[in-house]
Every structure is written in C-alpha cells, then in structure tokens.
Amino acid sequence: MRMPIVAGNWKMFKTPTEAIDFARALLPKIRDFAKVERVVCPPFIDIPGVAAALAGSPIKLGAQNVHWDRQGAYTGAIAAPMLQGLVEYVILGHSEVRQYLGDSDETINKKVKTVLAHGLKPIIAVGESLKQRQDGDPEAFVGGQVRAAFLDIPASALPSIVVAYEPIWAIGTGLSATADQAQTTIKGAVRDVLAHLYGSEDAQKVRIQYGGSVNPNNMRQFMEQPDIDGALVGGASLKVDDFTSLVQIAQEVKA
Ligand code: PGA
C-alpha cells in the first residue's frame, strides 16, 4: 500500500510572518490525519519560520525548487545542503519553473540526482500543455518527461520519489482534468513508463499525485483512481479549510 501524500505548493505567496501564522492555524486542523502524508511547500524565505512553527509535528516541509549544484556562483539560487534539516521534499520541474526559470528535462534530471544525494525526496512534476493535448498524444510527451527525469536513477530510489502529473492547462485555471483523463495519463505515461524502465513491482512503489485546480469539490474523484496517490495543490493550499478538506478526503478514500 502506498501512503497517500497531499502537498501544498504555496508558490510566491505569504510573507514570513503570514506563513508562520498560517502554519499555526493549519497544524491543529490536519494534525490527526495520520494516514495521509501532509506536506507544505512555502517560499524559501518562509521555510525556517514554518519549520519552527511545525517542529515536533507530523506535518512535513518541502521546497519549491533547488539548484543542481551543491554550491557555486549562481546568484539567487538555493542549494540542497541549505535545505537539509529543514525540508524533506523538493518540488522539481514544476511547469512554472520550466517556463519562467529555465528548467529543462536535463536540469531536472540533474536536480533529481542532487536531491537524492542529499537525502531529500523529489516531487517531480510533469504535464502537457493544452496544445500538446489537442495535438493528440499527451501520453507520449509526458512519458518522455518521465524517462528524462529518471535517467540513471536507480530502482532503490523509487520509494523516495513522488511524481506529480499536472496538466499545464489545468494549473491555476479552475479547469481540472477529469478523473478519467488523469487516471489514464498517469497510468499510461507515468506508471507504465516506470514499469518499462524498472519492472512493474518497482513501479508500484512510486507515489503519483494529480495536480491542477484540485479543490474540495473534485478531490474525491481523483482520490478514487487506483493510480492516483494524492494531490499537489496550489490555490486551495493557501486556505486552511480547503487544505484541511483535501487531507480529510484523501484519508477517507485511500485509508
Ligand atoms: P493549482 O496549482 O492547484 O492552483 O492549479 C497546482 C500546482 O501548480 O501545483
């Protein structure tokens, strides 16, 4: 059984003070849903404060990106050793980072290796654009992203890796994929590709999230899909009650 994982991607929202207040408000609401792994991914500058606010609690932290090098002359960047001891997860390859900050399949693969080498766990985001879906073969495109991200990653790392399937046209648009679309693409482009690379037994160890306009009204249908193990959530993770509902639904359906 894969442990469901619901992660909030706060993106570029919340000052350090706001982030601490939010974490304090969220903690008592989601503390007891022990059958779901609960993760919040604040902006870098908010991480130490949120880590202190959540210290000793079961709520885990993630970062939203990292550099592939362990140190160096990279103005504005954050390295994996800086995150050690503060976060457990790092989101990699989010479509916004691919689009605005130059992430490519190659840099994402380098980042996956760095994250794993530092004892952190990657949440690897993949997903097709609307044009790629309309042109007909989203699974080939997403499958290619998966192959590139996992290049030279050993099977022993698979239990530490989460993949988030996030169709770009569904992110922040209010337009979510249908549960069927999500399940079909996740199965065909992620689970089956991993099975091809590593064998089906190892492929079963990777947790796969759906992301893209997840909210308390559509969460249940995603969680009911056999290959969807949780959600990567943007907008709805910024509201205490909405994020709480998502965690609760994941526990109800999956546990
Ligand atoms: P959204 O964002 O839930 O606001 O669509 C999801 C994401 O970008 O991870």
Image (tube, grey):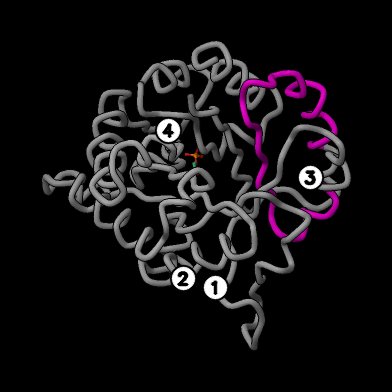
Q: Label 1 is placed on what type of residue?
A: Trp
Q: Mark 1: few, some, or many residues within 10 Å (few <14, many ≥20)?
A: some
Residue linked to disc 2: 110
Verify CB contact (< 8 Å) between mark 1 and mark 2: yes
Find residue 19 and name its label: 3
Q: What residue sits right under mark 4 in the picture?
A: 174
Task: Find out whether the residues at labels 2 and 3 contact each other: C-beta distance under 8 Å.
Answer: no
The answer to whether residue 67 is above or below residue 245 is below
Q: Is mark 1 within 8 Å of ligand 1?
A: no
Q: Which residue is mark 1?
A: 68
Query: Under tag 3, what secondary structure?
Result: helix
- Residue found at the very far top of the displayed protein: 252
What range of the chain is rendered magenta? 22-50
Question: Could you tell which of marks 1 and 2 lies nearer the N-terminus?
Answer: 1
Nearest to N terminus: mark 4 or mark 3? 3
Q: CA distance from mark 3 to mark 1?
A: 26 Å
What distance separates the C-alpha of mark 2 from that of mark 4?
32 Å
How would you rate the neighbour count of disc 3 (Cα within 10 Å): few for under 14, some for 14-19, many for 20 or more? many
Circles 4 and 3, Cβ within 8 Å, touching? The answer is no
